[in-house]
Every structure is written in C-alpha cells, then in structure tokens.
C-alpha cells in the first residue's frame, strides 16, 4: 500500500492505535512542516541542552530561510530552493556545526545542503531505484533475499542526506510504524521461517524514542526463526549524543544485534562521533560502516584509506563501499564504476584486510548487491591458474590433481617469461623489478643477537 507520493504506508492511520504514545517518534512534534528553533536568532554557542539528542532533533534546520539565518553569508539561489522543495531538508545543529566553508569544497556542506544539481534528472534515475516497493509483501517490510528482510521502522532521520536512496519515503512525513503494521510484519515472519536476519532501517531507527525502538526489536525477535537483527543508523555521524547508555543497555537485550552506521568522510569522525562508536562497541555491539562513493566528496583513494584506518581505531569495521544508487537527484554525485575499482586496487596491500570494505553495486530493479573487484585472475589452464597480486606480480598457482606425465619440451625464447609460462607451470612467478618488498628483502639482515628474546624469568 502506498500514499499519494508512492511512499510505503508505514505510519499510523487515523483510527489505528499508535505503537506507543504520540512521542514514539521524537520528531513528530515537527508535524509535516518545518518549525522554528527554540532560540531566535540561532547561534553556535553551546546551548545548555546541546548534548540532549531530543534538543538536537527539535532544533534541526528544516528550511532554507532557517539555513540562511544560521549561515548569514550563505548565498541562496532559486536552484537551491527548488531542490529543497523537492527533497526533504533537515540538518542537526551538531552536524551543521561541522561545515567549514559554504561551498562544494566542504564535504559536509555537500552532504546535507540542497544544491541545484539535484534537479538534473536523466532517465536512468528513479524514485525507487532498487525496486523495494515491488518486494514489499507487507507494508513497510522488504523481502528480497531468501533469508533476509528489511523493516522500515520510521520515515524520520536526524539529517537527510542529499544522496539518500529512500527519498521517496524519508522525511516527507515523519512517522513511526504503527502497532497494526508491526503485527503484520511479525505475522509474515512467523509464516516465513526461512527469514533468519532482519535489518531494521528507515529513516533512522535511532531517532525513535528508546522505548518505541525496544518494542520494535522485541516484536522482530518474537519470530522464532529470526537469529540476527541489524540496525542501520547515521546518528553516530549526524547526532552522536543519541548514543546514550540507556540506548546501549536496551540494545544489549536483543543480542545478537549488529549496528551499521554511515561515515562518508574523515571530517565526520569527530571526537564526539568516535565516543559514540566506542560506546556502542564497549556495550558489546559489533559496529560496521557503509560508505557511499560520492564524486567530489570522497572519491579519493587516500582519503578513504584515512577514513577506514580511523574507523578501525574506534572499532568500526568498514563493511561496504557502495556505488551511488540510481536515485533521483544524485547524478552529480555518481562516479564511474572504474573509479571504485581503482580505489579497491589501491587499498589492497596498503590497508589491513579488516579495513577493506566490499565494493558493491546495489543493482537496479531489485537485482541485489553485486560485488565488483579488480581482476586478480589473469589466466587459467587445467593445471595452473595465474593470479595477480597488489604489486602487479604474476603468480602461478598449481591446481589439485595428478599432472600429465608428459612434459612438453622447453620452448626456446629470447624474451622474458610471460603468462603462458606461468599457466603451463614452466614459471612460478613474475615479479616487478621495482617492487618495494623486493628492495626491502635485499636490505642487510639485523644481527641475530638483536632478535633474541630474553626468556629468563
């Protein structure tokens, strides 16, 4: 079932009891229209309630006039106004405070401030690029993969990303799933025991009141077949004060539970954001990160290496690097697939495997996630497969099984060995002459006595 905008109907109907009280979605007090902040004129000095996530939600920037009051030097344009009218605008005071320059050179500015480029609308872009509505047997729940389902628990986010895949849903009406809808989801899960993994998403589930989210997680957990629950949230990035001890303790009751967040740029990994991630990790909650590759924001291999290293230091595992989805308003963010492959090529060998995400394309029309990798298989024969490593070295890997007793005579050649020699087993490795590792191996070995360990106690 969809509303007039084609959005999945996940909110309360007028004659249907809400999940909790009227505050189950904290942002509901904003209704459908942007509201004025608690202070006029707004300022960036610390407010007594700055660290209260509810204050951050109530004081989100919801309109261009309010954005202009926050940033008096910002030059508004008709294109920005048209983009803000078409796609929802919300920025927490905290996240707005990370903006350093009011132009496209600032990554946070690009990620949250409407731009006229969003109005460019080539035919390859769609409202629902992943075909989620077609895979929605119950309103608000997507069942695409056999053993997994995704629950849209709310249509509210603390801040609306300009590259959001669910622009058709998120932010147009800020609501939570109703008790009746949640009951339908549980009923569907109970008759589909093949579903073992449920992703609770939105919107952002962490914008819900803790008690309301607790009820959603408990309902999902009540299905006997559900083994794993995952929650997708960007609050550690845009509103880290949401990660309270109360929230962590509630989440712990629903183990095994995983949290996936969404850092796109090192500028977002502030001390407050790091503290939020560590609080989740210290609470026993495994945290992963899903980065979207965005042109002009993070499509730089060294920048992403820096981000992934910093995430590992706060115990956040880089999980996915997503190619930007084919959703309306994102053409200016899209990169060629070759750029993502180039970045993955750079990361391999320079970064621990723990820090290398899977580069995936979420295929249009519900095709699902497709991993895209550099080509490391160069050639293959029945006896040997030729592999390429990150240095460009070619290695011959012998396949199992008895080799033919007949050995072909050596071929007289006047050049260096090539792929054929590797695939036939006549050569085991071809190494670039200038490889750093090769140079390091030629360095003088340290004296043996310098390597001895004192084993006396």
Image (cartoon, rainbow, N blue to C red):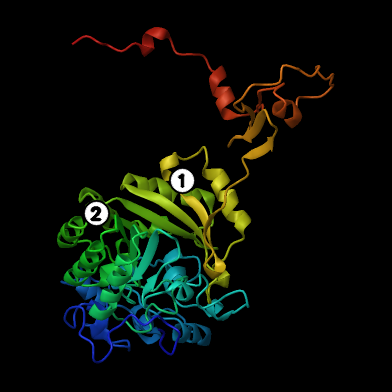
Residue 61 rendering spot, x and y as whole percentages: 33, 79
How packed mark 1 is, by other alpha carbons closer than 10 Å (few <14, some 14-19, many 20 or more), is many
The answer to whether residue 367 of the structure is visible from this angle is: yes
Label 2: few (<14), some (14–19) or many (≥20) C-alpha neighbours in 10 Å = many
Q: What is the quadrant of the N terminus in the image?
A: bottom left
Specify whether residue 153 is in view. Answer: no
On screen, 254 above or below 404? below
Q: Secondary structure at mark 1?
A: loop
In the image, residue 72 above or below residue 256: below
SS at mark 2 in the image: helix
The answer to which of marks 1 and 2 sits earlier in the sequence is: 2
Residue 9 coordinates in the image, percent (x, y): 36, 82
Circle 1 residue: 356
The Cα–Cα distance between marks 1 and 2, rounded to whole angstroms, is: 21 Å
Position above or below: 443 against 53: above
In the foreground, 433 or 68: 433
The quadrant the C terminus occupies is top left
Tell me the residue at 37%/80% (across/down). Answer: 171
Q: Is residue 70 left or right of residue 125?
A: left
Depth check: 131 or 340 in front?
131
Q: Position of residue 420 (x, y in %)?
A: 75, 29
Circle 2 sits on which residue?
280
Q: Is residue 18 left or right of residue 81?
A: left
Image disc number at residue 146: none
Q: Kindly give the residue lying farthest to the front in the view shown.
A: 191
Q: Quadrant of residue 7?
A: bottom left
- Residue 247 in the image: above or below residue 342: below
The reply to whether callout 1 and callout 2 are in contact (CB within 8 Å) is no
């Amino acid at each position: 079932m969809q509303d007039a905008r084609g959005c999945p109907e996940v909110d309360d109907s007028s004659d249907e009891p809400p999940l909790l009280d009227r505050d189950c979605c904290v942002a509901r007090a904003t209704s459908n229209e942007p509201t004025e902040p608690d202070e006029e004129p707004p300022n960036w000095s610390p407010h007594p309630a700055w660290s209260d996530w509810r204050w951050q939600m109530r004081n989100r920037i919801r309109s261009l006039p309010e954005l202009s009051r926050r940033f008096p030097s910002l030059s508004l344009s008709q294109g920005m106004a048209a983009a803000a009218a078409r796609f929802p605008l919300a920025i927490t005071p905290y996240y707005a405070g990370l903006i350093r320059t009011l132009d496209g050179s600032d990554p946070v500015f690009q990620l949250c401030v409407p731009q006229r480029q969003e109005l460019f609308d080539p035919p390859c872009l769609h409202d629902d690029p992943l075909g989620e509505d077609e895979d929605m047997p119950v309103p608000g729940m997507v069942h695409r993969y056999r053993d997994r389902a995704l629950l849209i628990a709310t249509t509210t986010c603390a801040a609306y990303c300009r590259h959001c895949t669910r622009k058709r849903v998120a932010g147009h009406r800020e609501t939570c799933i109703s008790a009746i809808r949640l009951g339908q989801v549980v009923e569907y899960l109970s008759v589909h025991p093949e579903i073992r993994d449920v992703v609770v998403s939105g919107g952002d589930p962490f914008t819900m009141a803790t008690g309301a989210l607790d009820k959603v997680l408990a309902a999902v957990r009540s299905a006997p077949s559900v083994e794993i629950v995952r929650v997708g949230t960007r609050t550690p990035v845009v509103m880290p004060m949401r990660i309270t001890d109360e929230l962590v303790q509630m989440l712990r009751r629903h183990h095994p539970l995983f949290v996936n967040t969404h850092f796109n740029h090192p500028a977002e990994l502030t001390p407050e954001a790091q503290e939020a991630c560590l609080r989740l990790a210290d609470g026993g909650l495994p945290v992963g990160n899903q980065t979207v590759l965005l042109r002009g924001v993070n499509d730089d291999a060294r920048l992403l290496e820096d981000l992934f290293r910093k995430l590992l230091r706060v115990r956040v595992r880089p999980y996915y690097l997503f190619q930007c989805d084919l959703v309306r308003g994102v053409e200016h963010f899209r990169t060629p697939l070759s750029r993502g492959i180039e970045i993955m090529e750079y990361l391999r060998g320079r970064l621990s495997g723990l820090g290398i995400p899977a580069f995936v394309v979420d295929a249009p029309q519900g095709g699902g996630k497709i991993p895209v990798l550099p080509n490391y298989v160069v050639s293959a024969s029945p006896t040997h497969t030729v592999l390429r490593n990150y240095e460009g070295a070619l290695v011959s890997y012998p396949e199992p099984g008895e080799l033919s007793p007949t050995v072909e005579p050596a071929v007289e050649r006047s050049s260096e060995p090539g792929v054929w020699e590797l695939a036939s087993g006549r050569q085991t490795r071809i190494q670039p002459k200038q490889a750093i590792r090769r140079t390091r191996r030629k360095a003088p070995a340290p004296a043996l006595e310098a390597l001895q360990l004192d084993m006396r106690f």
